[in-house]
Amino acid sequence: MKLWGGRFEEGPSEVFERFSGSLHFDRRLIDADIRGSQAFARALEGVKILTAAERAELVSAFDAIRDQARGSEFFNGATDEDVHTLVIRKLKERVGSLADKIHTGRSRNEQVSLDIRLWLRDEIDRAAELLINLMLALIVCADRYPNAVVPGYTHMRRAQAVLWPHYLLAYFEMFARDFERIQETRARVNVMPLGSGALAGSGFPFDREAMARDLGFASVTNNSMDVSADRDFALDFLYAASTTMVHLSRLAEDWILYSSEEFGWLELGDGVTSGSSLMPQKKNPDSLELIRGKCGRVFGSLSSLFVTMKGLPTTYNRDMQEDKEPLFEAADQLSGSLEMACAVVESVRLYPERPAAAAEMSWVVATDLAEALARNGTPFHQAHQIVGRLVLESVSHGRTPADWTPDALVKFAPEFTPEMAKLLQPSEGMKTREIRGGTGPNAVVAALGEAETRLERFRQMAKK
């Protein structure tokens, strides 16, 4: 059956039906479509289109269709144009001509917008929960190795020493922003479009606020033409998903490197790695490589919808049917990657002595020495030059920071004092960085406590 057709002398061609059909992908909106139609049936009762008995019959029929749709054979052989048409056909099979009333005063344009918003709202809630789980896993991993010292890198060169919890909290901050960003997206999604009609508003006096409350929306849309053309909320989600995937990919890249034989800092659990079909010794970080690889699919979804929307005249155009597959793809990959990342973090084992040795044998203490000179009265530019010469001397003769005694340090440059030699140990220099946001031990303890407090606040936000 079609939701249109009276104006046409002939039906659509087979090639057009095959080309334009969307049931094979929009079928996942069926629960949202049923929820929206049930709310609309109650609204139709409110404007006297349906009697109480008719409304009850329709709502009950929709419940039965929902139950039936959970079966594996529900969609078998369905040739309907889209999920909305399928639901109406199934409804008509159950209630006969009464089904013809359900579309009174409703356009498929607003119905599609409603269905996507209902579906996307649930997906956002799922992603938010997964982000909370991942942030918790990072905190637990930080608590497991509270005093571990690791080199921090710039340009993939050892730069300054940091505490392992400080490093993990950097990713906590990224994912915290992702959580806040996706919650902001949810607020834009959580606006009810029913009552907008095709573009000019409905000709029936629906109580739109009541419909919004019925479906759990925070507010209603303000302009019927805007609603018909609006997919900003979908773009917001795709951007939020893409940014989260950037952060997941960076974590994956770090840990692919840090778990390699060349670094050897950490080991990934057997449950998140795989072997080689040829080389018996291999333990490959496939889970992280897949997270890194799936970014392209999410970024592509954002680009796809941007390009689809960029040249469309107001209001609805059939091009907008192409919004769903990118949304579905991005939501699936985002949730899957977040779940996988959490499992990886929970599985990881750090070998603290290895990154500590890497820090001690390198010159990550150079900045600590230069700043000590500056605190002692040497202009920083001169202090930078002095320590730079010390590093050059050491590198040229194969000396590490530990090879320098207090006397040798003072002999190299009289600006040094014997007490500064303790800064040749990376863990000592950290103690000068107790500024908020720094890697000083006390600052990191405070930051971990603050992160736990924020995480609890996020949990409360996600429950609303």
Image: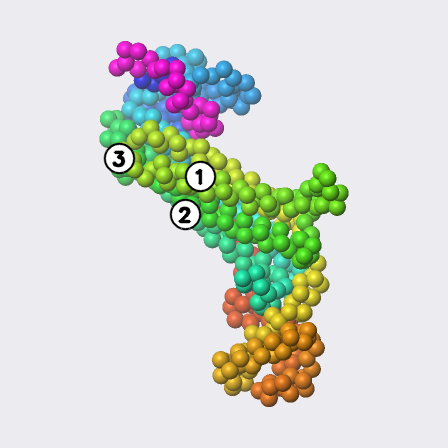
> How dense is the environment of label 2, judged by Cα within 10 Å: few (below 14), some, or many (20 and up)?
some
Spot occupied by residue 149 in the image (x, y as percentages of width and height): 65, 65
For disc 2, the marked residue is 184
What colouring style does the render use? Answer: rainbow
Q: Residue drawn 70% across and 58% down?
A: 351
For disc 1, the marked residue is 301
Name the quarter where the N terminus is drawn. top left
Q: Amino acid at mark 1?
A: Ser
Spot occupied by residue 11 in the image (x, y as percentages of width and height): 33, 13
Which callout, 3 or 1, points to the residue nearer the camera? Answer: 1
Residue 209 drawn above or below residue 355 = above
> How dense is the environment of label 1, judged by Cα within 10 Å: few (below 14), some, or many (20 and up)?
many
Q: CA distance from mark 1 to mark 2?
A: 20 Å
Please tell me whether mark 3 sits on a helix, a strand or a loop: loop
Q: Amino acid at mark 2?
A: Glu
For disc 3, the marked residue is 314
Which callout, 3 or 2, points to the residue nearer the camera? Answer: 3
Please tell me whether mark 1 sits on a helix, a strand or a loop: helix
Residue span colored magenta: 5-33
